[in-house]
Amino acid sequence: MDYAIIGLLLLNIVIMILLVIKTNSSDSNYDKILRDEMQRNRQEGKTSEKVLREELMNAFSRQSTLIENSLERFRLSLNDMIKDNRQQSSENRTMIDSKLEKMRETVEEKLQTTLQKRIGEAFTRVEQQLERVQKDLGKMQTLADGVGDLKRVLTNVKERGTWGEVKLGSILEQILTPEQFEENVQVKKNSQERVDYAIKLPGSSDEVLWLPIDAKFPQESYLRILQVSKDGDKSEVDKAVAELIKVVQKSAADIRDKYINPPVTTDFAIMFLPTEGLYSEVLRVPGVMESMQQKYRIVIAGPTTLSAIMNSLRMGFKTLAIEKKASEVWKYLSAVKTQFRLFGEVMERLKDQVSKVSRTLDKTSDRARIMDSRLRSLEKITDSEADDILGIESSIDEEE
């Protein structure tokens, strides 16, 4: 239909062009014919336009009906889809809500379990830390009590001396055996004075020679040196050192008068100072050690020095023990030598006796061979007949 209308329009256009071109050359007949033709064409165009309009209206009406039907079907389908989607969405929402609820319960349960576990572990750690703190506080209290006891010991002269004796005994016990020293030894007869410790040394006879060792701790003088040393006053330091030396010399004189008693003891004794600091303060004064040894016959020793002296004595004890054992070994070797000589003599006699027995056996074997050679000429008889003749009940093989 569209192509027909377009063709008619093109035909009208062509006719009009031809009329324009031939206007000047055409006569009046042609004009009339053309006008008639144009009139007829206009009439046909109107008729065709009317028909076309009607067809277009019908087509538009049909198309509109189709579109309305399609839209109605689409609307119905869309409503069904929306309804299905709503139902599906509702089901999905219900399922999602159910899963979310399960997830929430699971998460809450895990969170609750984890929280309780963490809280329990935290409380356990806190309890353990509190227990450790309590134990540490107990240790600190014990340490404080010990410091207080030590302070009381160091401020009491008698207890301070006891502490020096304990440290001296600890050094001796670590180095020497219990048989090599004794505690609270009386080195002078009819005297109540007893030295703290004495080392047993071998004497000229079976009697024991004692080496006295006494502990001294002049704490007041030593603490005064430490205090004035912090202040930095050299004159005060010199005075404090001089005071300490006087106290040490007095202690050395006491040890000499109370505990040196040759030949029961050695002609010297050892003064033990229980701290290295105190010993170094005495040692750094020039001439003090030599003066102590020459004037008072006293050897001053700190913990390290005393340990070295005791180690030297221990090596001496071992050497003496080895010498004693060596003499005993020589005695045993001499006895073994004598017995070995006697053993050689016995072996010689045994050899002679064995030789005699061997010669006797050789002679017996020769006589047996001679007798056997003489008896071969006799008539041979059976073993049983020989047993009957000689009166033997059974043969040697049967008895076995």
Image (cartoon, grey):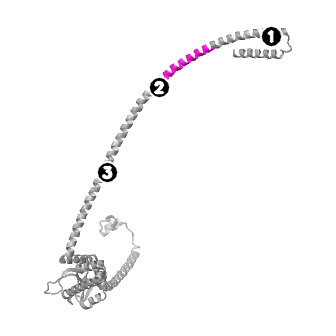
85 over 369 or under it: above or below: above
47 over 285 or under it: above or below: above
Q: Residue at x 18, y 77 (%)?
A: 158
Q: Are marks 1 and 2 in contact (CB under 8 Å)?
A: no
In primary-sequence order, the first of circles 3 and 2 is 2
Magenta stretch: dominant SS?
Answer: helix
State yes or no: residue 83 in magenta.
Answer: yes
Q: Secondary structure at mark 1?
A: helix
In the rendered structure, find residue 122 and report the number of the disc placed on it: 3
Q: Is residue 73 left or right of residue 54?
A: left
Specify whether residue 325 is in view: no
399 over 260 or under it: above or below: above
- Counting other residues with Cα less than 10 Å from the Cα at mark 1, is it few (<14), some (14-19), or many (20 or more)? some
Q: Amino acid at mark 3?
A: Ala
In primary-sequence order, the first of circles 1 and 2 is 1
Residue 169 picture quarter: bottom left
In primary-sequence order, the first of circles 1 and 3 is 1
> Residue 190: x, y in percent?
13, 87
Q: Which residue is mark 2?
A: 85
Closer to viewer: mark 1 or mark 3: 1
Observer-nearest of 183 and 240: 240
Q: Which residue is mark 1?
A: 34
> Residue 342: x, y in percent?
31, 85
Specify whether residue 183 is in view: yes
Q: Amino acid at mark 1?
A: Leu
State yes or no: residue 241 in magenta.
Answer: no
Q: Amino acid at mark 2?
A: Asn
Tell me the distance, in whole angstroms, between the alpha carbons under discs 1 and 2. Answer: 70 Å
Observer-nearest of 230 and 348: 230
Residue span colored magenta: 58-87
Work out which quarter of the rendered image holds the C terminus and state it.
bottom left
